[in-house]
Amino acid sequence: MTEDHSPRGWAVTLTRLLDAVYPEDHLRYPVDVAKLALDYSRQRFPDQPIRRVIADNDLDGCDGALIRGNTEPPKWGILYNSSHSPGRVRFTIAHEFAHYLLHRRMLPEGIRCGEDAVTRRDGEGIEKEADTFAAYLLMPFHDFRKQIPSDHKPTLDELGSAAERYGVSLTAAVLRWLEYTTRRSLFVVSRDGYALWAKASDAAYKSGIYLRTRSHPPFELPKQAVGGSAVMPLDTKIKLKHPSGIWFNEPVEEHAILSEEHDVVLTLLHLGSYVRDFGEEEPEILAR
């Protein structure tokens, strides 16, 4: 049987291995991805293993890197920014491990990965592939769905519990949930009342609910929104219910928290069910 060496295929292979080796739930999660990268590479690719996973707290805008040693055949190393949170570090190591599995033959000098590609999962090409692998490895759908069913409307506390289970950031957990939920929901990251970036669930996007932030003028949050207010205390989760006309031309349930690590407001918007009738005109959208 031919192995699937796609980002998802590699992650599924390793997930099945971890499920078999660690049947006990408390040992299975979070994934010790540094140990996995060292052990698996040494066993699977003994002539080109990963020899080191190294911390550095001064990488100048770099989240992590895959480093090639000066030997033939080459030995490899993973470098990560230790000034970041443990959850972000785990995702970064998984991201670089993906580059090793998927891309090392096309990266003879290794690769340095910027913050945006890893944090927002907003990269393209091989960066997107590395993020896909990391998400599938650290937060496999079969387990995430058990924690939060696809039709459930989670709070930030519930998504925070999932983030703790998988040892990732709250942002990473929300983005992963958005990939499988059947709900119409939108995640917004803002600072000083303006959206930095946003991600919609598939159901929300198909109904016309999303924000345009890339290559567009900054989107100002509604003044009634949590992120649009002048002051918000740290680590305080706020829930608001907005009538139609505040965020969009329909009611919205808003959950928000100020992230101390990045000094940004994380906002999760839940909208109601939406069934488009045949012949219905496109919905009017206030925010894009």
Image (cartoon, helix red, strand yellow):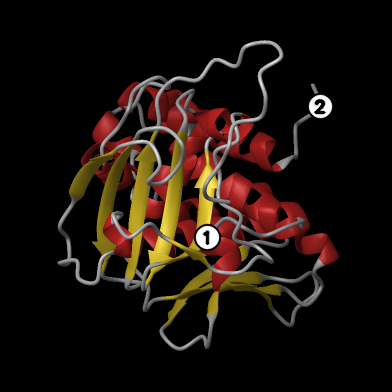
Image quadrant holding the N terminus, namely top right
Q: Which amino acid type corresponds to the residue marked 2 in the rendered image?
A: Thr
Q: Is residue 47 left or right of residue 41?
A: right
Query: Which residue was labeled with disc 1?
Result: 197
Percent across and percent down for residue 203 are: 55, 28
66 vs 205: above or below? below
Residue 283: image location, x then y, percent: 59, 31
Residue 16's place in the image compared with 190, above or below, is above
Residue drawn at point x = 39 percent, y = 76 percent: 82
Secondary structure under the numbered disc 1 in the rendered image = strand
Evaluate whether residue 168 shows in this view: no
Report the residue at 77% width, 77% height from top. 109
Among the two numbered marks 1 and 2 on one chain, the one whose residue lies closer to the N terminus = 2
- Mark 1, Cα crowd under 10 Å, few <14 / some 14-19 / many 20+, is some
Mark 2 closeness class: few <14, some 14–19, many ≥20 residues within 10 Å: few
Image spot of residue 128 (x, y percent): 68, 53
* Residue found at x 64% / y 54%: 130
Q: Amino acid at mark 1?
A: Trp
Q: Which mark is residue 242?
A: none
Please give the residue where the numbered disc 2 appears in the rendered image.
2
Residue 85 horizontal side relative to residue 161, left or right: right
- Residue 114 visible: yes
C-beta proximity under 8 Å, tags 1 and 2: no
Query: Is 106 left, or right, of 251 in this rendering?
Result: right
Nearer to us in this view, 35 or 231: 231
Helix, strand or loop status at disc 2: loop
